[in-house]
Image: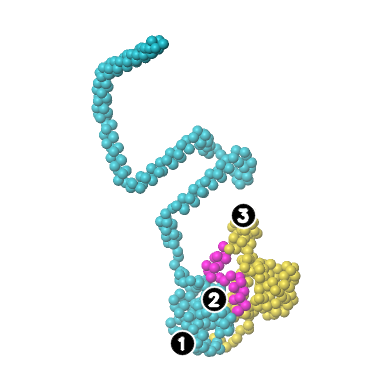
Amino acid sequence: MDAIAPTQRKVALICSHGGLDEVYPSLILANAARQSDIEAMIFFTFWGLDAITENKIDALHVNLAGNASNTMPTVIAGLPGMESLAASMMGKQMRELDIPGVREMMGILDESGVELYACELAMKMFKREKKDLIPQVKDVITAGDFYDLSVGAQIIFT
Amino acid sequence: MATAMDLGTANAILTKLDLLSVEIARIGERQRQTEELIEEFTPILKEVMATATDRLDHFEKKGYFAFGKEALGLVDRVVEGFSPDDVRQLGDAVVSILDTVRALTQPDVLAIAGEVSQVLVRADEAKPIGIVGMMRATRNDDVQRGMAVMMELLKHVGRAASAASKSKKPRAVVRQSARLALPAAPTKVDRSAPKRAAVCTPRNEPVVAATVIDGVAFTADGHVVDPNAWTRELGEKIAKTQGLPLGEVQWKIIEFARKEFLETKASPNIRRITQAVGLSTKEIYLLFPKAPARTVAKIAGIPKPAGCL
């Protein structure tokens, strides 16, 4: 209720992995930022591109092999279908808690004013074009553009 | 010619008669033998009957009949304790029980069981092995065959178990679900309500008043300390400090938030608000541009929404 207006806070999140469990932190943090009146943007690069790619977004997996928190033996975790099984189990738990799915979350973020960007270099590497991405993606930008856009922001790498 | 023929015929008849008389004599002999047998047997039978009576008397004295009576009593009790249905089922089962017993007592099965029991007798002599030892052991032919048998056994047990669970009465299932339902921890959030965005439960920190404006206490982050101290006028005042005009739609949202908090003791987050009032996230942000759920809670005189969404 004080008259002193604090400077506008801003966060720039970098999402570099495409696992279901690796994408959510960026999405939740960006959403929470907007809920706290903090400006937010997310830069999707490398495997993180999967989270904004039209034909991948609904089938993100959970990485089991090489995940220290996974109690399943690696031999079993490496079996075909185990990752999508884990993803569907995690998705079920999230639905029980009423956490929106990745696609719905992207819509909410866009409506909340979070700016979503794709990494140009990663797009070239994975041979993807702007039309392969979900419509909420504002632009395909370079690493240099990212720094220009995130002036004054706190940068969080996930 | 005719005389010769007659002679022949008469010879044949005589022969037949002879045979007949021999037959009659044999029958007579048998009859006599039977009579003799009965004659001879009568005393023996008498003897046997006497002995049998003695024996029965002896048994009676020994208590066999008392035992028999008891046994009948036992049968009575069984009849009382089991319904005809049970007995019928038992009757059906007897065949399979006998089949099982027969199968289990086949010489080769008994031989296997004998060998296994020998191993079990010497179980304390067995050396402990780890997973590597187990892998090494699987190279042994006998172990491989044993594993195949065990696998087959497991398959059948599994099949039988699933068949049994299919035919199981629903009563057992109900009992289990009741047991599962018991330890459910009581929560402040009403779980029965569909689609509740309560990802994190509200923290139960004591609310500390930081400032008092017009006799109403506020927390450091600008929420009314006591929701009951809230009035519509106070809400309008708070909105004015945020630079927000309150129209019909805004009031609809604020009233929903108050109602929700009073019912569930949890302030609604933006997801809950959009679901309840039927507006999009974008529209809520247009109405309350800065931190919408928090702003709504501030104006509605309720605590800051908990949770991550």
Circle 2 SS class: helix
> How many numbered discs sit on the rendered protein?
3
B49 left or right of B166 in image: left
Distance from label 3 to label 1 (Cα)?
A: 60 Å
Where is residue A101 shown, x and y percent of the image? 58, 70
Q: Amino acid at mark 2?
A: Arg
Which residue appears at 65% of the width and 76% of the height? A136
**Residue indicated by mark 2:** B271
Vertical arrangement, residue B38 with respect to residue B150, above or below: above
Q: Which of the pair A36/A56 is nearer the observer?
A: A56
Q: Amino acid at mark 1?
A: Arg
Ranked by sequence position, the earlier of labels 2 and 1 is: 1
> Residue B51: which numbered mark, if any?
none
Q: Amino acid at mark 3?
A: Ile
A27 left or right of B229 in image: right
**Residue indicated by mark 1:** B232
User: Do the CB atoms of the residues marked 3 and 2 lie less than 8 Å apart?
Assistant: no
Chain letter of the cyan region: B
Distance from label 2 to label 1 (Cα)?
A: 24 Å
* Classed neighbour count for the residue bearing mark 1: other residues with Cα under 10 Å, few (<14), some (14–19), many (≥20): few
Q: In the image, which residues are magenta?
A: A89-112
Circle 3 SS class: helix
